[in-house]
């Protein structure tokens, strides 16, 4: 076991100083046991065992003592299975424990995910990796840091089975490996990477290195998921080149690579567009036509400057269709797992105890599996600061904070309870949460702006990070002001009445720090009479707008401006337009029953009868019915179940449109498969696909926006 502890100390020096030694002793002891008792663990190379079984860390999650608990629930389920079947069974267990839920950016520990029954994709994948490692299966998280074809990212899991890396979606059980909703998305990735910690030697096991950040060394896994090629980028020797994709209407980093002694960087990536930056220097690389680029100082963008950003095209690198029996088995596993998870979550809440604190009932419900810790803190005495402290925490904090840590912060803040307005004290002195850092007792100093705020709150000074840019604000003379003096100006962003600008969806704003472009947060600001007024520090700014086309490519605009102290500026936002032809981008449909050659173009609609978005699209179709009926195309409505056509709005439309074909498919499976394949959200029906005469999806959309039916008609009109 000494060798295990030596590896952990060398691989995770930052964690070794931040967590108790007993935690790492627990990891070492459990892994030591697996190495000697589990055949598939004993057969691993030492490097595979250390990195992918022993290592306590998966990504940037909080560490927790969970291996023995997970093993106790899993071992009897997997001990007699093959490695492949064991991996699938572990994922079924994970689905029984947790499901996806959007949450804040702090990555919870695997134990917290287990106790609260949910997590982001990064948390779910760290949970699955931890569960696999708990039974001696070598596993790692892989990550597409940003997609190019849609505004998001994703993490999933690879498991080493019989010497071969296989993949699966975390807490999303499938009947086979190498299948997940993200198969098509991954084939359009510019980069997929994994991580190791500490020194490595076997690059055939880990993948080509992409550079180190802190404790982690990144490895390139892109070629197993997407069509790739080798790019060569030119800069100065030793210069760090940041690779970026246009995501959420801003340039988002996906990797930072260091130029060699000749000033070159060579890297294997997906075949799409990149933006490169290093300080003020930049370059665009259009991957479909270029194999590299050289960074240089750009021309000023004092006026709106248009550019296109192309995403990689989808390719069936890992096709994984299911037959009918596999679909039924999958549905049964998902339903059974969901029922078990919901029952376990319901069992954590103690109704009798909660009745003692009716005003804190919601907080106790949010605590889920951490109910006991929150109740213990709340019920210790009748101090009104106890519920005040709890109400200052995030939902995720309520699910993993300990009563002991809460006591530390209660006593720390108590001396200043009557010095400030109650709300100021509660949120900015009493609260132990600054940003998305791991909650501690603040006994170990932290660096950066978070550390500054912690130091101020320890001294009884209300402080926070400004949401706009993360600058430190302190309470002075009845208001929050910047800790460091600054000069500001005012900017009014203006838009046309018919335009809809949504921050980090089709526009963004960056501030030049003198070294890098820093994204600002304006998401909570409201437009008024087509204007958005913002007070900003004096300096240099960059605005990006982007119109994303259905196939994932983007028509973008860029503008830079300077704001002087005391200056008032007006910036009209400009969003590029597109034609109907731009919207049409034929792609293969993923299900045989929907594809194939057809004599006519068709409108395919998956409807959720009675739901408001479906009601809207049905009303628009009814209003435009003569125009649709004049087209020589088929129309097919996919409904959840027989009888759905009797819903009032739908029945009224069908009475006027007898040529509509009604189909009652495996509705949920079809919606999920088609939407995911086309880069859409399956949780936002109705789903609409315009199919061309070759049986391909020429255009697709989901959800509802005003004018959706007219747009579908215009696209169909182009194809009939």
Image (tube, helix red, strand yellow):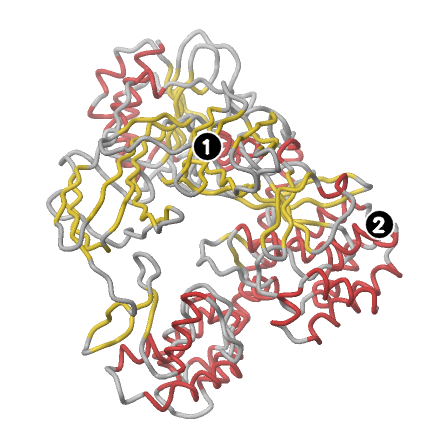
Asked if residue 367 is positioned above or below residue 634 in the image, the reply reads: below
Reading the image, the residue beneath label 2 is 44
Q: Quadrant of residue 718?
A: top left
**Label 2 vs label 1, nearer the camera:** 1
Left/right of residue 496 with respect to residue 638 in the rendered view: left
Secondary-structure class at tag 2? loop
559 sits to left or right of 697: left
What residue lies at 53% left-to-right and 35% top-to-bottom? 669
The residue most toward the top is 599
Q: Residues within 10 Å of mark 2 (few under 14, many from 20)?
A: many
Relative image position of residue 163 (x, y in whole percent): 81, 41
Residue 159 position, x and y percent, is 72, 45
Q: Which residue is mark 1?
A: 295
Question: Which mark sits nearer the N-terminus, 2 or 1?
Answer: 2
User: Looking at the image, is 103 positioned above or below residue 529?
Assistant: below
Residue visible at 88% across and 60% down in the picture = 37
Q: Secondary structure at mark 1?
A: loop
In which quarter of the view is residue 76 placed?
bottom right
* The N terminus, quarter of image: bottom right
- Residue at screen point 80% across, 51% down: 47
Q: Position of residue 192 (x, y in %)?
A: 59, 39
Instruction: Please give the count of numbered marks on the rendered protein.
Output: 2
- Could you tell me how far apart the alpha carbons at marks 2 and 1 are, in whole angstroms? 44 Å
- Residue 690: which quarter of the image? top left
Which residue is at the front of the view, 295 or 544? 295
């Amino acid at each position: 076991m000494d060798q295990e502890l030596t590896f952990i100390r060398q691989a995770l020096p930052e964690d070794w100083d931040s967590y108790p030694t007993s935690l790492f002793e627990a990891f070492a002891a459990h892994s030591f046991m697996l190495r000697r008792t589990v055949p598939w663990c004993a057969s691993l190379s030492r490097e595979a065992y250390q990195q992918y079984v022993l290592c306590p860390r998966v990504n940037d999650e909080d560490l927790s003592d969970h291996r023995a608990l997970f093993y106790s629930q899993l071992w009897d389920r997997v001990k007699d299975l093959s490695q492949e079947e064991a991996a699938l069974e572990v994922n079924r267990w994970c689905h029984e424990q947790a499901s996806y839920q959007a949450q804040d950016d702090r990555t919870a520990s695997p134990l917290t995910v287990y106790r609260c029954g949910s997590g982001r994709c990064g948390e779910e994948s760290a949970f699955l990796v931890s569960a696999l490692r708990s039974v001696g299966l070598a596993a790692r998280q892989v990550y597409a840091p940003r997609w190019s074809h849609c505004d998001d990212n994703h993490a999933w899991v690879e498991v080493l089975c019989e010497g071969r890396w296989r993949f699966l979606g975390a807490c999303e059980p499938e009947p086979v490996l190498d299948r997940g909703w993200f198969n098509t998305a991954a084939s359009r990735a510019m980069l997929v990477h994994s991580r190791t910690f500490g020194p490595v030697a076997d690059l055939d096991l880990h993948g080509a290195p992409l550079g180190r950040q802190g404790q982690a060394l990144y490895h390139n896994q892109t070629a197993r998921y997407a069509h790739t090629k080798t790019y060569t980028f030119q800069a100065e020797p030793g210069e760090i080149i940041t690779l970026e994709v246009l995501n959420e209407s801003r340039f988002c980093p996906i990797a930072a690579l260091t130029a060699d002694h000749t000033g070159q960087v060579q890297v294997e990536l997906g075949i799409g567009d990149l933006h490169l930056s290093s300080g003020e220097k930049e370059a665009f690389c259009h991957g479909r036509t270029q194999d590299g680029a050289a960074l240089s100082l750009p021309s000023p963008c004092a006026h709106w400057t248009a550019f296109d950003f192309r995403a990689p095209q989808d390719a069936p690198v890992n096709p994984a269709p299911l037959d009918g029996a596999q679909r039924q088995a999958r549905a049964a596993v998902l339903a059974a797992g969901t029922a078990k998870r919901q029952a376990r979550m319901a069992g954590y809440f103690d109704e009798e105890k909660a009745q003692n604190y009716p005003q804190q009932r919601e907080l106790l419900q949010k605590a889920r599996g951490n109910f006991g810790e929150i109740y213990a803190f709340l019920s210790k005495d009748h101090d009104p600061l106890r519920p005040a402290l709890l109400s200052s925490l995030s939902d995720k904090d309520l699910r993993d904070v300990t009563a002991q840590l809460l006591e530390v912060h209660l006593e720390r803040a108590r001396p200043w309870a009557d010095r400030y307005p109650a709300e100021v004290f509660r949120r900015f002195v009493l609260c132990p949460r600054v940003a998305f850092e791991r909650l501690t007792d603040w006994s170990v100093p932290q660096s950066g702006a978070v550390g500054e705020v912690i130091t101020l709150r320890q001294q009884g000074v209300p402080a926070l990070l400004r949401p706009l840019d993360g600058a430190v604000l302190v309470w002075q003379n009845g208001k929050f002001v910047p800790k460091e003096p600054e000069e500001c100006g005012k900017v009014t962003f203006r838009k046309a009445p018919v335009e809809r600008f949504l921050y980090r969806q089709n526009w963004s704003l960056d501030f030049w720090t003198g070294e890098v472009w820093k994204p600002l947060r304006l998401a909570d600001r409201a437009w008024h009479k087509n204007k958005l007024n913002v007070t900003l520090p004096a300096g240099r700014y960059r605005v990006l707008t982007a119109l994303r086309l259905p196939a994932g490519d983007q028509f973008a605009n860029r503008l830079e401006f300077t704001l002087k102290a005391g200056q008032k500026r007006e910036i009209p936002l400009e969003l590029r337009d597109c034609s109907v032809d731009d919207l049409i981008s034929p792609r293969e449909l993923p299900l045989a029953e929907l594809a194939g050659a057809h004599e006519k173009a068709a409108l395919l609609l998956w409807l959720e009868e009675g739901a408001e978005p479906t009601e809207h699209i049905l009303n628009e179709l009814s209003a435009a019915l003569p125009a649709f009926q004049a087209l020589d195309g088929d129309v097919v409505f996919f409904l959840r179940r027989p009888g759905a056509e009797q819903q009032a709005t739908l029945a009224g439309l069908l009475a006027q449109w007898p040529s509509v074909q009604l189909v009652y498919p495996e509705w949920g499976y079809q919606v999920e498969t088609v939407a995911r394949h086309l880069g859409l959200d399956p949780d936002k029906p109705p789903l609409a696909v315009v199919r061309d005469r070759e049986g391909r999806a020429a255009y697709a959309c989901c959800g509802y926006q005003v004018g959706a039916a007219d747009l579908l008609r215009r696209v169909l009109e182009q194809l009939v």
